[in-house]
Amino acid sequence: MSYSKIFSGNSPELAYEIMNYFQNDFSTLYSCILVNRLWCRLTIPLLWENPFSIPTKNFSFIETYLYNLNDDLKMKLNEYKIIYKSLPSNTLFNYPSFLKYLNTMKIISSIERWTEVAVGTLKSENRDLDSVFNFKRLLHMSLFKIFIDNEVNLHTFEIEIADRDYNYSYFNDILELILQNTNFIYNIGNLNLYIGNPSCSSYHNNSNEYALIKNRILQIINSYRNLKKISLYHSHYSLYQPLLLSEDYNCSNTLKTIILYYIDFKGIINLTKIFEQLNVLESVHIIYCYSLNISFVQQIINLTKPFKLKSLFTNEIPQIEPLELLLQKSGYCLENFGFSTTLYNITLTLQQQLLELVIKYCKNINFLCLSGIASQVTYLIFNLIENIKHNLNYLSINMQNNDIETECSSIILQNLGQTLPSKLEYLNLGLHVKKSDFEIFLKNSQDTFIKKLLIYNEEGQDILSSIKEFIMKKKRINYLSIYDSFIIDTILDYEYQSKDLFSLNNEVREFRLYNIKVQSYYDSVIGIYDFIKENN
């Protein structure tokens, strides 16, 4: 089929397939809008499926939504004199109808950032804090009212309360409005719940608000009766434990994913009962939890059904025996694994024993994240990578803050390249980089295509010329992030400085000529919790 047919609109089905291929490549999708009328009609719905999650510094799409307000609400918003330009008088599309994904935390943070810009344009005498707060509160309600009135059919609705000091009134207003409009709940395809941990001061100052949030969340779940995913952080396990134990919420036949993040299992004795009654559970993710001792593991071993442990990340190993029993039971399921020695000192013997257990029991690891590993066990890292290379897609090795970082970094760079699979989605190396070692790595890994390459070069040598010679000109990557940190010896003291390749405009343009996109290092790092939340 000729390209002309696709661009002319004679093959809308194929054009739609092309659009979907670029679903998360927003810059490309924006370009597609300009091709012709058909491509514009196909692209706009994709861009407006989940606008609150698009990484942007421009939140003007909120104003586009506000066009759909009734005149009464528009008048109320205008009374605050914060919207410094008139709302759109007309729009080409019914944008709210395209909405498929909605996350409470993301909509609140988007409004916060949009309001910051709007308030920043006001004269100081008009920046009344009470007015700004009331305006934001009305804005949250107005946006959700738009979605409800347009009878949006959400593929996924996520109730997320993160560990930030946002005013809980926003959450309560949103949840109350949802409970008043049950059709909104029934039109949700997947309901997910993510509960973070508020700061102590925030929780103390808003304890009544938080109790109200919890009760309203439980009411929504009871009405919906189709909760698919739950994530609990720190102390909130006990608060939401009734969800997992009570038959009133019907979670036993709907809940597919449980994420446990920084939970202390000390004193928790009903895990067997909880997991035994979850009939359709597909994955459990344990991220930096505490007290992974024999008491915890024995409850898992007592299960009469498989325990589908998909993720295990830890930064403490009090004993190796419980972890061995856990991996014996569930290691075959494990897809995401990592441990860090930077917070708690994990002895050399325990590091070695754990890596040996993972090599023995875990063949299906997709995401491997290791931090602060001793140089004496690096050979086990290479054995592990060799053992899982047919599944491995994401690899992060970080030796920062390691007393013997230089030696360990050299060993890794000299031996890692030849053990990598033929393709990686993501490789993040935090090392003290010697140029000669790095070139060995580049030569040994020349048969590996790396979609995203990230390098944190701590007090190492300049490697940009090597990157250009071995990677840029051979087009072996799609995305690149390099962050250099170094020490300058001043007259009075030492001064720490840093440099991100992303800030060097001429270099960014040069890489772009080879279709390599340079990105900010810290914006490109994959957070473990976010990765698991978004991919399960």
Image: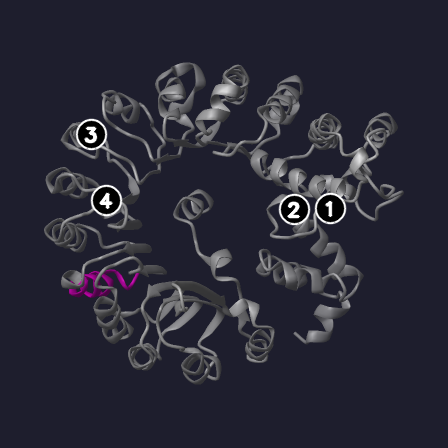
Q: Amino acid at mark 1?
A: Phe
Query: Which secondary structure lies at badge 4?
Result: loop
Q: Which residue is mark 4?
A: 344
Is 398 one of the magenta-colored residues?
no
Q: Are marks 2 and 1 in contact (CB under 8 Å)?
A: yes
Q: Which residues are magenta?
A: 378-391
**Against 351, is 30 above or below?**
below
- Cα distance in 3D space between marks 4 and 3: 20 Å
* Earlier-in-chain disc, 2 versus 1: 2
Which amino acid does the dot numbered 3 rest on? Phe
Residue holding disc 1: 61
**Marker disc for residue 296:** 3
- Circles 4, 1 touching at the beta carbon (< 8 Å): no
Crowding at mark 2 (Cα within 10 Å: few <14, some 14-19, many 20+): many
**Residue 387 falls within the magenta-colored stretch:** yes
| The label number, if any, that marks residue 51 in the structure image | 2
Q: CA distance from mark 4 to mark 1?
A: 45 Å
Q: Mark 4 vs mark 2: give the one in front.
A: 4
The foreground one among 344 and 4 is: 344
Look at the numbered discs 4 and 3 and tell me whether their residues touch, using CB distance below 8 Å.
no
Res. 210 in view: no
The 10 Å Cα crowd at callout 1, few under 14, some 14 to 19, many 20 or more, is few
Q: Residue at x 67, y 63 (%)?
A: 15
